[in-house]
Amino acid sequence: MMRLRVHHLLCTALYAGKGYSEAFCENMQKTVQWLWEECREVELTAGPDHICSACPNLCENGCKLDDNRVVSKDEKLAQALGLETGRVYTVPVLLGTVEKNLTAEIFETSCHNCDWYAQGLCRYETLREKYRNRLR
């Protein structure tokens, strides 16, 4: 089972090989492959997860860059998608729920202030296609 931040449901689908450090990128690539190809269950969280474990910005109190802005982002996104943090989901149910409930507005609200979005690495249309292909 994997522990995953809610917003990482979007990030993993759009990951393009860039990150904070080499160790972060290696961990992210393994996590993306595992989630999208092998994983069976995911526990959703609004706190540090498997991806965060290799992030150089992780500190004792969470992300040192944002004063827990990411926690709020995860909580709002979970609510918008009809998901619950602290709950364990099977991957098909989890990804199906995201695919069914995600809108362009939810995506923009969650992602508009992210550095990766600003660099043009994340687009709603690309995310929708990834989810559609995964669920076929």
Image: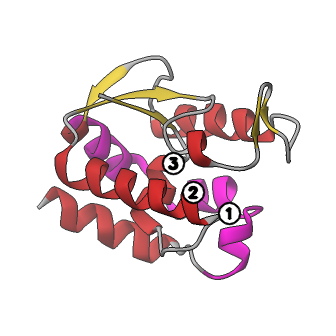
Q: Which residues are magenta?
A: 93-120
- Per the image, label 2 sits on a secondary structure element best described as helix
Q: Nearer the viewer, residue 29 or 67?
A: 29
Q: How many marks?
A: 3
The picture quadrant where one finds residue 105 is bottom right
The residue labelled by disc 2 is: 24
Mark 1 and mark 2 in contact? Answer it, CB < 8 Å. yes
**Of marks 3 and 2, which one's residue comes earlier in the chain?**
3
- Describe residue 123's horizontal placement relative to residue 9 as left or right: right
- The crowding category of the residue bearing disc 2, from other C-alpha atoms within 10 Å (few below 14, some 14 to 19, many at least 20), is some
The residue labelled by disc 3 is: 8
**Numbered mark located on residue 20 in the image:** 1
Amino acid at pointer 3: His
Q: Nearer the viewer, mark 3 or mark 2?
A: 2
Q: Position of residue 29 (x, y in %)?
A: 40, 61
Q: Position of residue 7 (x, y in %)?
A: 55, 46
Spatial CA distance of label 3 from label 2 is: 14 Å
On screen, 47 above or below 91? above
Task: Label the magenta part by its dominant secondary structure.
Answer: helix
The picture quadrant where one finds residue 73 is top right
**Of marks 3 and 1, which one's residue comes earlier in the chain?**
3
Amino acid at pointer 1: Tyr
- Describe residue 26's horizontal placement relative to residue 92 as left or right: right
On screen, 74 above or below 115? above
- Per the image, label 1 sits on a secondary structure element best described as loop
